[in-house]
Image: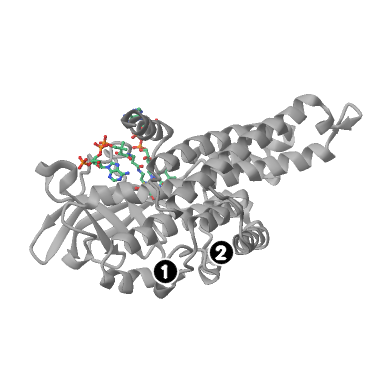
Amino acid sequence: MDFNLSEEHLMIRDAARDFARTELLPGVIERDTHQQFPAEQVKKMGELGFLGMMVDPKYGGGGMDTLSYVLAMEELSKVDASSSVIVSVNNSLVCWGIETYGSEEQKQKYLTKLATGESLGAFCLSEPEAGSDATSQRTTAIDMGDHYILNGTKNWITNGGSADYYLVIAQTDREKGHRGINAFIVEKSWEGFEVGPKEDKLGIRGSDTHTLNFNDVKVPKENRIGEDGFGFKFAMKTLSGGRIGIAAQALGIASGAYELAKEYSKIRKAFGTEICNHQAIAFKLADMYTQITAARHLVMQAAWDKDNGNNYDLSGAVAKLYASQVAMETTVEAVQVHGGNGYVKEYHVERLMRDAKITQIYEGTSEIQKIVISRSVLKE
Ligand code: CAA
Ligand code: FAD
């Protein structure tokens, strides 16, 4: 493994860091308070190439590697995890899924717009009765010859109200179980597609999470991704890469909280000295630094595996499991270092603590990551 960052990697990291400070930081508290989607910021991120970072330039993307992507995700997430999850879903679920498994027509029609940020994507696997248990799909896609008829409900969909194109997983042939599941590209404007209520969430409140309803939506056959019955494997393979992005998001939330705690501990005085001179506080910083460094190595390992053609199901799950735990522990301690100030919005750490929790839930809960990890290591 070679984790030496090239000039290009450093430039991408610095560009994401600058963008986060100048464009995401102002207004981040307001957006969190009022559950405002960062529409202007997303438009700018599209223009700067953050929405299709790994897509081949011939489809309008940046042609970058996964390492570049995780570096950018970390920097954006230090400041605003609501914006970074929009970046993550569009890059590693929607663009990657279409680029890797879509037809040339699908790439020309959809990927070119998604990669440039002209359009935004959403990934729709979860349902009220099928979250962790993702093979239990209730949404149906009935084969009508030249098209499918889609019926059902998806919930918890990130970019649910703001996306233009939706990757929707649905059951075509129930008798075949997970081998009877398909994935489709669905356009928002199609008849029978309805965006339901927006969730009022604990964290990542700037990101819009919706229930979606499909009532006899006619989906042309050419919008199915891959062979008939490939939909569940498509979802699993796509999520394996997605989890690396969420691991980087968790790492960013942890590093953001650590940096704030460190700076605060150097200026806040108690008992006649800066609080960093009290060993209890200094040791918290030591623990945070150690855990964050370990999490960063795991995230880079998973990105390296993906970039080098290795299997990354295991390393991606390990990185997500560990980095999300570090995000939770670090943000709780960062609030503690800030004392009473940690408990109010102005100091940012309470928001980072609320945002951290979702990294242990979406793209597979921590328990699901342990299933993936244990099955993989037991096979060895
Ligand atoms: N790559 C390719 N195929 C895979 C795979 C992978 N990573 N993982 C599983 N499969 C295949 C299996 O090989 C199997 O196929 P065969 O029978 O042909 O061999 C098939 O998929 C079913 O696999 P399992 O028997 O392992 O299925 P399971 O019912 O035990 O479930 C699971 C496995 C890992 C728990 C899976 O259901 C899962 O990942 N659940 C979590 C769902 C999830 O992560 N949802 C996230 C939604 S998106 C999101 O959250 C986005 C966001 O917030 C921003
Ligand atoms: P459940 O599956 O009901 O799990 C409940 C609890 O039981 C969890 O602790 C879980 O780990 C545990 N559990 C379940 N099965 C097992 C088992 N076999 N062994 C041990 N423990 C188990 N989904 C999408 O498709 N697209 C999105 O864009 C998206 N965005 C999201 C955004 C937000 C803000 C949220 C909250 C969710 C989002 N999700 C999305 C859904 C998310 O992926 C699911 O919430 C997650 O997979 C868990 O499913 P569930 O909520 O149904 O919980």
- Give the amino acid type for the residue marked by disc 1 in the picture: Asp
Residue visible at 47% across and 40% down?
320
Please give the label number shown on residue 56. 1
Q: CA distance from mark 2 to mark 1?
A: 23 Å
Q: Is residue 71 above or below residue 315?
A: below
Residue 131 in view, yes or no: yes
Q: Quadrant of residue 54?
A: bottom left
Secondary structure, mark 2, is helix
Determine crowd level at label 2: few under 14, some 14-19, many 20+ residues with C-alpha closer than 10 A. Answer: some
The residue lying toward the viewer, choosing from 223 and 27, is 223
Where ligand 2 lies, by image quadrant?
top left
- Give the amino acid type for the residue marked by disc 2 in the picture: Gln
Image position, residue 66 (x, y; %): 48, 56
- Name the mark nearer the viewer: 2 or 1: 1
Please give the label number shown on residue 13. none
Residue visible at 36% across and 65% down?
164
